[in-house]
Amino acid sequence: MAGKKRYFVLLDENGNEIGVFTGRQPRQAALKAATRGYTTIRLRERGTNKIHIYEGSRKKVPAPPNAPSWMGSEVWKPVVRKIGIERIEKKGAKKKKK
């Protein structure tokens, strides 16, 4: 059975939405963002209050031997490292009284 596709919104430093990446796991979406050149990757999962934080980079590597003819001799390989998870406060949420 295939896993469910999840949507992750890429946020900039100010919390503005600048893109949407999909994947089964947040790491998969972070790898896609790193491939496009983002280095500070903050992904908010739609429908939750979690922000997954990654450090990303990419480097040129030789194309695999089974690469199609249209692909160049070098390709970008993404690298990400998870920093942590932040939780955001829901707007208008009431605090519980003791």
Image (tube, helix red, strand yellow):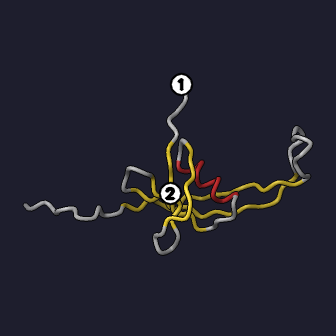
Mark 1 Cα shell of 10 Å, populated few (<14), some (14-19), many (≥20): few
Asked which secondary structure carries label 1, the reply is: loop
Furthest toward the bottom, the residue is 14
Find residue 35 and report its horizontal and vertical position in percent. 70, 57
* Res 9 label: 2
Horizontal placement of 96 versus 78: left or right? left
Residue 64 image point, x, y percent: 86, 44
Q: Residue at x 64, y 62 (%)?
A: 56
Residue found at x 50% / y 65%? 17
Q: Amino acid at mark 2?
A: Val
Q: Is residue 96 above or below residue 64?
A: below
The residue shown at (55%, 29%) is: 2
Image position, residue 40 (x, y; %)? 58, 68
Image quadrant occupied by the C terminus: bottom left
Q: Amino acid at mark 1?
A: Met
Task: Give coordinates of residue 23: x percent, y percent.
Answer: 56, 44
Identify the residue position indicated by label 1 in the image.
Answer: 1
| Residue 19 location, quadrant | bottom right
